[in-house]
Image (spheres, rainbow, N blue to C red):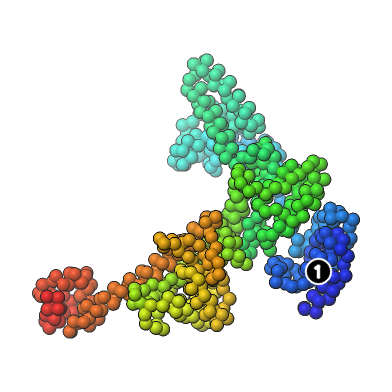
């Protein structure tokens, strides 16, 4: 393989310093990657130089490259256009490829009495009418949900009048989001009136509905139909409230797309929020394998996405500036026929929209991995701030506890995918020395833990799991002591110390040489603080248990005729040392497992 890389590098070094497109092929001649370059020689030769600076995806791609071709272009922009065309034609394995399964969406309106509305992906029911088509499924689903809540239409699967009176109304009725026709108390006339207004709302939007409903309310009031006027007034208020809620996810920039990327060990998720007239009208998520958090990946995504979505807004707002941004803006501008700007906000409303976009991307990854969005964000932030190659799904943390060197113990806690994994918690009694030495204690614990790993790495014991990250309750000294042991044992695991302030709260993380602040990474900070508190609690609880045991042995078992078994029986019977001390001689004689000499010895000891 090294010989092949050497040959490819030699070929790459002979390339011209001109813009163009390069085409990577595997041993069977299949195209596996297509890229563009400002200077072909510089870009292509990077692939076949040192592998240390390559991402995992690039390393895997290079391992499969058997040969490459190239096409010289007159400009970098022309290279981008050609690259997009070739990728669309050949769909190489290592390029970002998006599947466009969006299709159209419709609002289905059933005919007859007790009609229903629903969001559908087809219009193949001849007995119903359809509103649409719409490009955005998100818009259609939201619109139907809003109409059902505003006009109190049922969203369940019950059929009317068949299911009248067969069950109690559901929660939606009690929170005033359904008129509950299932009770049989609502007239078909009143229901059909609600239904017709909901359809009008879906066809013409909120403003038109408010105007029409206002006219109806005034007419009802003039005709002295005050109950009907009050119902219509409530619907107008509901339409207005729904519009106010929608402004929560809104933008002062009328038309833009917000794009963010979140990555974990196996997957990346691109999230796109699309705004028109300042309101979120569509959103899309793309979960992709082998995506890494780089500027280059964002450029590739934008190229693929806007080949599928020709409706390009005048502004793209991103979480990270993409690679070759000027050329990318030129390409987008040429496609849509008007200027397109790419920006990365640093503060204000736009930054909040980007963060919301990132959180939604994290939520989609979390759902795929079976954890919550909160835990996913915390792990991703922690990996980012510590510079880890992958998300630390399996974290071990250690703390030492003693009292002036007595009852020297340690606790090990495990967090799996951001949650305590109590099955893997372990307690250690320090055996290698007497007295207080936190560094030596930590070394002994880590050595014993990884000796157990060597024994159990092929079985189901939790000691057989290699952690993604080790967090020590301590600073540079503990970190240095542990790293010495891991080097001796040839174990490679990221290790960091959790530095505490004067109030024993997490202040920062250290890698042995520098302190890494976590204050600006709230989710990661909360996770690390939780881990530190948990490992401290676990270690000190074990220490207190050991001290109680020692105190127990140093009192009762010092009495002649009282061994450990009899001492335990006494403690079970009386409940505490205090109760044993206050017991009369006859009470001691009556206790289980006691005889006259032992009862006298216990009584005399305390009196």
Label 1, secondary structure: give it. Answer: helix
- What number of labels is visible? 1
Q: Nearer the viewer, residue 545 or 156?
A: 545
- Which residue corresponds to the image point at 64% horizontal and 38% vertical from the top-left? 252
- 421 vs 145, nearest the viewer: 421
Quadrant including the C terminus: bottom left
Q: Is 519 located above or below residue 474 in the figure?
A: above
Task: State which quadrant residue 112 falls in.
Answer: top right
User: Hey, which quadrant is residue 141 in on the image?
Assistant: top right
User: Which quadrant is home to the N terminus?
Assistant: bottom right
Where is residue 573 drawn, in percent x and y? 20, 72
Q: Residue at x 16, y 72 (%)?
A: 581
Q: Is residue 547 visible?
A: yes
On the image, which quarter does residue 288 sit in?
bottom right
Q: Position of residue 28 (x, y in %)?
A: 82, 72
Residue visible at 81% across and 49% down? 331
Image coordinates for residue 39, horizontal then vertical, percent: 84, 62
User: Taking 34 as reference, is 477 left or right?
Assistant: left
Left or right: 263, with 455 as reference point: right
Label 1 crowd bin: few (<14), some (14–19), many (20+), radius 10 Å: some
Residue at point 41%, 84% (across, down): 432
Q: Nearer the viewer, residue 449 or 507?
A: 507
Q: Which residue is mark 1?
A: 45
Residue 126 visible in the snapshot: no
Q: Position of residue 594 (x, y in %)?
A: 16, 79
- Judged left or right of residue 282, residue 230 is left
């Amino acid at each position: 393989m090294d010989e092949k890389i050497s040959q490819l590098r030699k070929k790459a070094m002979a390339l011209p310093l001109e813009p163009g497109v390069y085409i990577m092929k595997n041993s069977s001649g299949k195209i596996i990657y297509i890229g563009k370059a400002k200077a072909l020689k510089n870009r292509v030769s990077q692939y076949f130089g040192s592998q240390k600076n390559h991402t995992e995806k690039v390393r895997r791609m290079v391992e499969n490259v058997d040969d490459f071709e190239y096409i010289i272009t007159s400009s970098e922009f022309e290279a981008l256009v050609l690259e997009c065309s070739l990728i669309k034609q050949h769909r190489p394995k290592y390029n970002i490829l998006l599947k466009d399964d969006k299709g159209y969406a419709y609002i289905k309106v059933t005919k007859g009495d007790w009609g229903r509305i629903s969001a559908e992906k087809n219009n193949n029911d001849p007995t119903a009418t359809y509103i649409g088509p719409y490009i955005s499924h998100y818009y259609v689903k939201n619109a139907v949900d809003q109409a059902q809540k505003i006009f109190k239409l049922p969203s369940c699967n019950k059929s009317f009048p068949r299911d009248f009176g067969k069950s109690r109304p559901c929660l939606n009725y009690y929170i005033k989001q359904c008129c509950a026709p299932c009770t049989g108390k609502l007239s078909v006339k009143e229901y059909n009136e609600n239904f017709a207004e909901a359809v009008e709302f879906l066809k013409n939007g909120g403003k038109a509905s408010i105007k029409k409903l206002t006219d109806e309310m005034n007419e009802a009031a003039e005709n002295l139909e005050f109950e009907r006027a009050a119902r219509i007034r409530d619907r107008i208020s509901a339409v207005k409230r729904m519009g106010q809620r929608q402004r929560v996810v809104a933008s002062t920039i009328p038309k833009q797309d917000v794009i963010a990327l979140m990555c974990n060990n196996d997957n990346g998720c691109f999230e796109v929020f699309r705004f028109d007239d300042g309101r979120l009208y569509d959103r899309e998520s793309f979960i992709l394998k082998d995506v890494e958090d780089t500027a280059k990946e964002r450029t590739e995504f934008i190229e693929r996405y806007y080949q599928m979505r020709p409706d390009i807004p005048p502004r793209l707002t991103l979480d990270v500036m993409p690679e070759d941004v000027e050329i990318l803006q030129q390409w987008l501008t040429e496609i849509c026929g008007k200027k397109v700007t790419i920006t990365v906000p640093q503060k204000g409303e736009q930054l909040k929209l980007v963060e919301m976009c990132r959180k939604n991307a994290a939520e989609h990854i979390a759902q795929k991995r079976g954890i919550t969005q909160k835990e996913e964000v915390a792990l991703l932030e922690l990996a980012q701030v510590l510079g880890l190659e992958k998300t630390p799904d399996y974290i071990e943390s250690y703390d030492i506890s003693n009292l002036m060197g007595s009852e020297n113990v340690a606790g090990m806690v495990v967090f799996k995918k951001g949650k305590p994994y109590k099955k893997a918690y372990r307690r250690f009694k320090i055996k290698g020395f007497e007295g207080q030495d936190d560094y030596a204690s930590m070394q002994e614990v880590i050595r014993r833990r990884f000796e157990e790993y060597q024994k159990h790495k092929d079985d189901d014991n939790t000691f057989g799991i290699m952690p993604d990250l080790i967090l020590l309750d301590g600073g540079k000294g503990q970190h240095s002591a542990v790293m010495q042991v891991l080097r001796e044992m040839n174990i490679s695991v990221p290790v960091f110390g959790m530095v505490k302030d004067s109030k024993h709260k997490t202040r920062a993380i250290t890698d042995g040489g520098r302190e890494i602040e976590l204050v600006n990474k709230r989710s990661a900070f909360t996770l690390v603080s939780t881990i530190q508190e948990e490992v401290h609690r676990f270690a000190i609880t074990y220490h207190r248990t050991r001290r109680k045991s020692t105190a127990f042995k140093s009192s009762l078992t010092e009495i002649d005729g009282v061994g450990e078994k009899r001492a335990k029986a006494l403690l079970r019977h009386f409940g505490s040392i205090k109760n044993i001390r206050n017991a009369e001689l006859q009470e001691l004689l009556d206790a289980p497992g006691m005889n006259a000499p032992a009862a006298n010895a216990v009584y005399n000891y305390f009196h």
